[in-house]
């Protein structure tokens, strides 16, 4: 651990970084924000798994890049010269990391992409495979920045200077490498003097909106107002919101979207008040192998996150039953558009996805 650092803007840190010389995955410990900025140096499979499970590194794109760097470092440490032994150990690490969280498709997407590097280079020396794994992981981080910037440009085309924007959870820089998804239009607008008024839902129970989104937007000079989750109807009814932008963890083939718990409530309220509801999604998050939102595995997390965590004393009767799903599914009919790095997709989403992926294949 590097310890606690002060006097540096949170936006100056890399959410996820590779320190190859020290064989370390370096992440900001997001559970300590905004009070402390602590960098964690992760070396072992268990440390990486725990950092993902405990949300020290979180947000779909950041999880994907962390997994890519993590599996590269674990592969680098495999002591084997023959491909079969190397690949067997690689698979053990891959399956272990993949079990950390089930809902964000970026985790398995990144690990599968790294596995393909092994398979496609199986006839090469193991050292060469390791080198190519490193190149791929580094490229994935660079791609993430390019993709998020493109999402920002398309998202920005949907709003105008001075607009009020509501967002839920943290789909900001702390959830990705730069710009991120839901905040990309906000950051690009900020660079261009759009003067958005942003409302950030606090996002119970883990408060990613309060601790992370409000923090990073405020640190960037964005006009941000923090609200409790149950206030979204009030700000929409007041006419303060022109658009909702959220990120996502997995988009099913029919356009249903899994994102942080509470997202579907915001979408339903937005529909009631005629506020457009936009989901920002890199194409890597669109999972054509998952037919509908009902097929998405929703992570359930410990009861203590609802009853005790963040409170000085427990806020619920001891032993009370708790239901704590980390994500929910927003039905596609509540989604005005899905903003990808290749453009703004409108319903019907199945046809829009087929057209997009067809065009990408023919490139
Ligand atoms: O449980 P978390 O904090 O990892 O949940 C994160 C979200 O739901 C984000 O909105 C999503 O991953 C998109 S991040 C660009």
Image: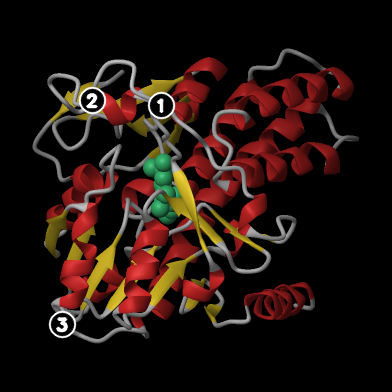
User: How many C-alpha atoms fall within 10 Å of the one at disc 2: few (<14), some, or many (≥20)?
Assistant: few
Q: Is residue 91 left or right of residue 274?
A: right
Dot 3 or dot 2, earlier in sequence: 3
Which of the two discs, 1 and 2, sits closer to the camera?
2
Q: Is residue 216 left or right of residue 254?
A: left
Secondary element at image label 2: loop
Quote the CA–CA distance across marks 1 and 2: 22 Å
Which of the two discs, 3 and 2, sits closer to the camera?
2
Secondary element at image label 1: loop
Pick the front one: 30 or 89? 30
Residue with the mark numbered 2 = 316
User: How many C-alpha atoms fall within 10 Å of the one at disc 3: few (<14), some, or many (≥20)?
Assistant: some
Quote the CA–CA distance across marks 3 and 1: 37 Å
Pick the front one: 292 or 97? 292
Count of picture labels: 3
Task: Where is residue 12? Give x, y as percent.
Answer: 23, 47
Residue with the mark numbered 3 = 162
Q: Quadrant of residue 244?
A: bottom left
Q: Which mark is residue 54?
A: 1
Can residue 44 be seen here? The reply is no
Task: Where is residue 336? Give x, y as percent.
Answer: 46, 79
- Is residue 105 positioned above or below 43 on the image? below
Dot 1 or dot 2, earlier in sequence: 1
Q: Is residue 330 left or right of residue 347?
A: left
Task: Where is residue 232? Give x, y as percent.
Answer: 23, 64
At 70% across and 80% down in the image, what residue appears?
Answer: 351
């Amino acid at each position: 651990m590097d310890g606690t650092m002060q006097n540096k803007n949170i936006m100056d840190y890399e959410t996820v970084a590779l320190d190859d010389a020290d064989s370390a995955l370096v992440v900001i410990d997001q559970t300590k924000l905004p009070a402390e900025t602590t960098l964690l140096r992760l070396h072992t499979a268990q440390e990486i798994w725990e950092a993902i499970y405990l949300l020290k590194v979180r947000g779909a794109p950041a999880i994907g890049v962390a997994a890519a760097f993590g599996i590269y470092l674990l592969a680098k440490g495999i002591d084997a010269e023959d491909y079969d032994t190397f690949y067997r150990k690689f698979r053990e690490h891959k399956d272990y990391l993949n079990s950390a969280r089930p809902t964000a498709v970026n985790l398995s997407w990144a690990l599968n992409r790294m596995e393909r590097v092994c398979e496609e280079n199986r006839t090469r020396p193991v050292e060469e495979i390791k080198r190519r794994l490193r190149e791929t992981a580094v490229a994935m981080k660079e791609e993430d920045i390019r993709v998020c910037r493109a999402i920002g440009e398309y998202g920005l085309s949907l709003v105008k200077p001075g607009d009020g924007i509501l967002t839920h959870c943290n789909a900001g820089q702390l959830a990705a490498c730069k710009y991120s998804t839901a905040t990309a239009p906000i950051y690009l607008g900020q660079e261009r003097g759009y003067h958005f008024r942003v409302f950030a839902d606090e996002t119970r129970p883990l408060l990613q909106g309060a601790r992370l989104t409000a923090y990073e937007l405020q640190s960037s000079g964005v006009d941000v107002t923090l609200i409790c989750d149950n206030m979204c109807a009030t700000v929409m009814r007041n006419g303060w919101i022109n658009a909702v932008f959220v990120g996502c963890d997995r988009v099913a083939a029919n356009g249903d979207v899994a994102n942080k718990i509470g997202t579907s409530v915001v979408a339903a309220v937005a529909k009631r008040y005629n506020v457009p509801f936009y989901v920002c999604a890199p194409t890597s998050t669109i999972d054509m192998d998952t037919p509908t939102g009902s097929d998405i595995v929703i992570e359930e997390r410990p009861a203590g996150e609802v009853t005790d965590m963040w409170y000085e004393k427990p806020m619920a009767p001891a032993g009370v039953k708790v239901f704590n799903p980390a994500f929910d599914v927003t039905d596609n009919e509540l989604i005005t558009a899905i903003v990808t790095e290749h453009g703004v997709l409108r319903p019907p989403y199945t046809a829009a996805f087929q057209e997009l992926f067809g065009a990408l294949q023919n490139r």
